[in-house]
Structure formats: structure tokens, C-alpha cells
Image (cartoon, rainbow, N blue to C red):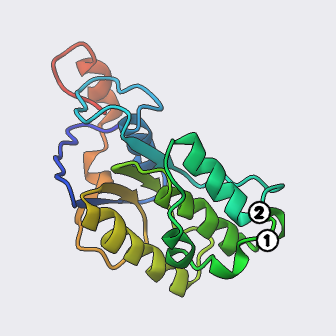
């Protein structure tokens, strides 16, 4: 459980969540994304304009790279931005079935869906898993030059330097004392 987490992000800003495994980064992202309830506290943000990406790639194996991205674009009512193929180094893989991609290629495809869904606020949990250095840099460039530059916001849990100018929070400093948490549960203290 976390206590006292408080931040505000404006358009074009990124926040990087750091901390050891099990510190609460994923839990905080899931609460922010509305995937699990907070014990207390308030989250204020535009509704319906965010997306959460976890360790799962969200890739359909029976579809090609292009078909996967077209599926996600259609699901979110957005046109397929052809630039996403270059942004994520997928141009040479248009017609390849996702089942035949390497782990890193599948991860790039999974991240490329963020470039076609048109959501302003991204909650990203360890987005660079399975990526080589060049792909990590390419992803960091996309976040900075495409997403943030267009007024997007990103909250990213990662141990990797993505080359972003971002605020950082060490989640470990917000770990609640389990004994105090039990005693304060009924108070006005805000817990996330």
C-alpha cells in the first residue's frame, strides 16, 4: 500500500516511477488507469482519454503486423497512422504474421498500438521488456517526439533510462507502514 503520493502533470509532461520490485509501481499505474480501486484519495483526469499498457503485448498471433495495428486503430475509432511503422521499426514487417515475430518484434508491435489508438494519457508498465538498446532508444524517441510533443502525458514505470526529460518519483519512499495503515483506515489520510 502507498501513502501520500501526490503529483500533477500537464500536457507534454512525463513522470517516471522508479523503485524496487514489489514497491507498488504496477499497483499505482493500475489505480491511475482505473483498473483497480484506490483505498482512498482522488484521481482527477479526463475520462476516456487514457490507455494502460502492461507486460502483455496485446498482439493477435493470427494477424499480420498491419492487421494488428488496423485492429487497434479501428477499435479506438482512429485512422491507421502509417508513420507508426517507421516509428517502431516495423516497415519491413507489414505482412508478417505476429506469430512469426521475435519477442522484441512482438514488443515493438505491442507498443506501436499506442501510436494508433489516439489516447492522450498513457500509463506504461515496464514498456521496454524484451527490447534491445536501439529499440529502447526508438521507443523513448517516440514518447518524446510524437506523444509528448503532441501534448500527451506519460506515466512510466521503468528501470531503464528512456532518454526523456521527465520528473521521477521513487515509489519506495511512499510505502505505507502496515501497522499505521490499519490504524488510519477510517481517517482522512489519502492512500493510493
Which residue is found at the position 58% from the left and 67% from the top?
129
Report x, y in % for residue 78.
49, 48
Q: Residue furthest bottom?
A: 134
Does residue 186 appear to the left or right of 19 in the view shown?
A: left
Q: Position of residue 167 (x, y in %)?
A: 21, 63
Farthest top residue? 186
Looking at the picture, tell me which residue is in the foreground, 126 or 86: 86
Which residue is under mark 1? Answer: 96
Choose the circle earlier in sequence order: 2 or 1.
2
Residue 178: x and y, percent? Answer: 35, 32
Estimate the spatial distance between the alpha carbons at disc 2 and disc 1, rounded to whole Å.
Answer: 5 Å
Residue 89 sits above or below residue 9 on the image: below
Residues at marks 2 and 1 touching, judged by CB atoms closer than 8 Å = yes
Where the C terminus falls, by quadrant?
A: top left
Q: Is residue 178 visible?
A: yes
Instruction: Kindly identify which residue carries mark 2.
Output: 64
Q: Is residue 131 above or below residue 110?
A: below
Residue drawn at (75%, 74%) of the image: 102
Around disc 1, counting alpha carbons within 10 Å, would you say few (fewer than 14), some (14 to 19), or many (20 or more)?
some
Amino acid at each position: 500500500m502507498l501513502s501520500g503520493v501526490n503529483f500533477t502533470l500537464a500536457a507534454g509532461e512525463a513522470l517516471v516511477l522508479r523503485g524496487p520490485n514489489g514497491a507498488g509501481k504496477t499497483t499505482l499505474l493500475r489505480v491511475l488507469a482505473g483498473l483497480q480501486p484506490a483505498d482512498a484519495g482522488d484521481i482527477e483526469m479526463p475520462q476516456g482519454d487514457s490507455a494502460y499498457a502492461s507486460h502483455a503485448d496485446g498482439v493477435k498471433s493470427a494477424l499480420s503486423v498491419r492487421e494488428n495495428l488496423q485492429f487497434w486503430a479501428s477499435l479506438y475509432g482512429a485512422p491507421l497512422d502509417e508513420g507508426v511503422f517507421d516509428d517502431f521499426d516495423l516497415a519491413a514487417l507489414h505482412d508478417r504474421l505476429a506469430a512469426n515475430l521475435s519477442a522484441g518484434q512482438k514488443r515493438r508491435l505491442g507498443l506501436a498500438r499506442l501510436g494508433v489508438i489516439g489516447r492522450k494519457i498513457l500509463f506504461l508498465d515496464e514498456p521496454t521488456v524484451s527490447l534491445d538498446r536501439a529499440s529502447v532508444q526508438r521507443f523513448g524517441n517516440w514518447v518524446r517526439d510524437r506523444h509528448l510533443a503532441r501534448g500527451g502525458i506519460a506515466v512510466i514505470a521503468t528501470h531503464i533510462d528512456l532518454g526523456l526529460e521527465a520528473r521521477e518519483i521513487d515509489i519506495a519512499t511512499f510505502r505505507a507502514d502496515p501497522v499505521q495503515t490499519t490504524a488510519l483506515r477510517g481517517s482522512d489520510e489519502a492512500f493510493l
